[in-house]
Amino acid sequence: MSDNYLYFPGCNIPYRENQYELSARAVAEKLGIKLHDRPFTCCGLNTEPLDEFAALLFSARNIAVAEEEGMDLVALCNGCYKTLRVANRKLKQDEKLREEVNEKLRAIGREVKGTIEVYHLLDLISDRIKPEHIVKKISARVAPFAGCHSSRPSEYVDFGAKEKLEKIIKLAGGKVVRYRDMDKCCGAPLLALSEELGINLARQRLLSMKERNAELAVTMCPFCQVSLDGLQVKAEQEFNESYNVPSLYITQFLGLAMGIKPEKLGLKENKKDPSKVLKKAVM
Amino acid sequence: MEKIELKYREVSSDLVKKVKQEPGGEFISRCYQCGTCTATCVVNPFKDDFNPRRIIRMAALGVENVLDSIEPWYCAVCYLCTERCPRDVKPAAVLMAIKNVAANEGKVPAAFKNINENIAKIGRLFEIDDFTNFMREDMGLPPIEPIDEEEIKKLISGTRFEKIIKGEESET
């Protein structure tokens, strides 16, 4: 098991969800995962609807950078993870496609050979986390939200994200709450076209979490977090309802249980303030 | 961009061919219209004119104005339909193929075009300016380095994407 990985930030995290990266780096460091930085473009996801081949070129460009460094890629965003994972597999399996892509990459002095792997950070954490890493218990009813692209399309994306997310929540002392439609979309992908649709989908997830008396939600993707955290505040105002399910990134949640200071986890950046429930739950 | 209407004069067998040529569009003809995709869809309950079964049917029949409609663009690409489709049509991929065909003819909703204009220029969805990097530094995070814009230009040179962004789509 290598300890050195290239961190793939994607577009969303450095722009508006820096607390995910901050907490991820803190947890990774404690678990001996060394994250290295290089300039990366968008993973390609946003270009797929316009031109799938161009989208693949963006993925391939980033994969080629990782190959040059001789390190595997690790993503925090489900969207980046899925896009790079699918691209990497296609490029490894389909020689004709790889040649077509490499023809374009040569213009920028790069090439994909098929020598690296793409991981989601949750996968690496799950492999390394042990009971002795846990110094505080978070006794709360926790709704895991694994999102879509951590486990779909299952033909390409299949590392047991849901099970691993639940395993970590339990290890940290949380009580896992299962709820209606827990594997359905958070609504974030729809925000570009219709904020109303996005909020409606987010509200459905929050209502079903509330129905099961969840006290916290835990996410592993910046899109899901934007929906469950940022849109939660909006939906509470718009629908005049109260869900009261503050959402944390899994790295913030686990980080607290590992005894990492809250300021090293960026908890203040979360829109729906989790401090009240954490004050009661963290022991 | 209203609901797709079945206009027989605008039916063409070319559309199916074009969809099948796109990656992911290959299996459109397998569809036997069971509606599992629409029953599974998370968007449909909130927007009943987003109906993947219907969109796929219209495209399979060759109804050209599928390409003028905004309907396919409402797919959240969550892949639930793809997991459940009993014919392995891969409905999310078929919708993606339909969008690619439309985009190649210059039919891209503004929201999708706007975000891709950024990507074509700076390589990313959002520009990470000095202020954002200053905030990151404040948090103890390393700066996000800009991508060489020339590299992006060369990477997408000659692609359909480049033409779509420049507004030089192929006429059909």
Image (tube, helix red, strand yellow):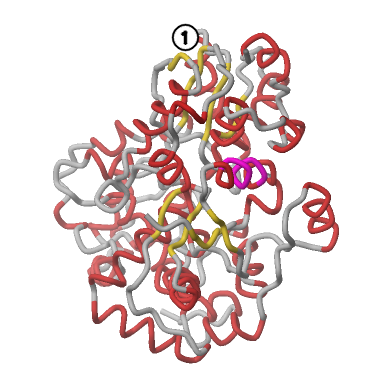
Residue at 54 percent of width and 80 percent of height:
B162
Q: Residue type at mark 1: give it.
A: Arg
* As drawn, A53 above or below B82: below
Query: Percent from the top left, x then y, of residue A215?
Result: 57, 13
Counting other residues with Cα less than 10 Å from the Cα at mark 1, is it few (<14), some (14-19), or many (20 or more)?
some
In the image, B6: left or right of B133? left
A11 and A129: which is toward the camera: A129
Residue under label 1: A212
How many marks overall? Answer: 1
Residue B7 in the image: x percent, y percent?
Answer: 33, 56
Q: Is residue A65 above or below residue A155?
A: below
Residue A218 on the magenta span: no
Q: Chain of mark 1?
A: A
Residue segment shown in magenta: A22-27
Against A256, residue B127 (above or below) is: below
Residue A199 seen from this side: no
Residue at the spot 49% in from the left edge and 64% down from the top edge: A44
Whether residue A173 can be seen here: yes
Q: Residue at x 39, y 18 (%)?
A: A180
> Which quadrant of the figure contains the C terminus of chain A?
top right
Residue B18 x/y as whole percent: 29, 71
Describe the element under mark 1 as helix, strand or loop. Answer: loop
Helix, strand or loop: magenta stretch = helix
| Residue located 36% across and 35% down the image | B41
